[in-house]
Amino acid sequence: MRKIREVLRLHALGLPQRQIARSCSVGQSTVSDYLKAAAVASLSFDQVAGWDEARLIEALFGKAPPSPKRNRLPEPNYAQMEAELARHKHLTLQLLWEDYRAQHPAGYRYSR
């Protein structure tokens, strides 16, 4: 959890950045970054004292970019694979995997 509000509070009390960093157990560069962001946004501790953390982070750093959507690979039908393995005596996982790769060329594969 970020300690932005505590950093701003201690800064408002007049403590130096090194002492704020030690008190909050964060790096001095983190304290500096938080104070610079607050200065750019023209925010002081008195203004943000009652804000929740999400609102404070958005006010200082802007909205977080949306996380990229992951390409989901088609999953093999594991239940069907298990049933086929039980039914066919000479069927192997290798043969099932080759069948899966024939149906889904962009699907899961062995790493190289």
Image (cartoon, rainbow, N blue to C red):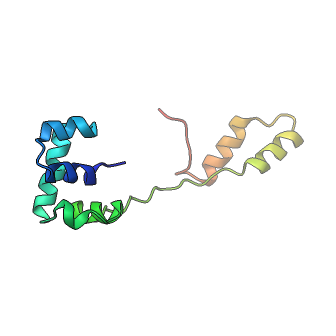
Q: Quadrant of residue 57?
A: bottom left
Question: Can residue 6 be seen?
Answer: yes
Q: Is residue 87 above or below residue 51?
A: above
Identify which residue is drawn at 21% across, 67% down: 47
Identify which residue is drawn at 45% across, 56% down: 70
Q: Is residue 65 above or below residue 93?
A: below
Q: Position of residue 66 (x, y in %)?
A: 36, 63
Q: Position of residue 52 (x, y in %)?
A: 35, 63
Give whichever of 14, 109 is nearer the camera.
14
Identify which residue is drawn at 52% across, 51% down: 106
Give whichever of 101, 30 is nearer the camera.
30
Label tally: 0
Identify which residue is drawn at 80% across, 43% down: 82
Q: Position of residue 78 (x, y in %)?
A: 73, 47
Question: Can residue 26 be seen?
Answer: no
12 horizontally vs 73: left or right: left
Q: Position of residue 107 (x, y in %)?
A: 56, 50
36 horizontally vs 61: left or right: left
9 horizontally vs 80: left or right: left
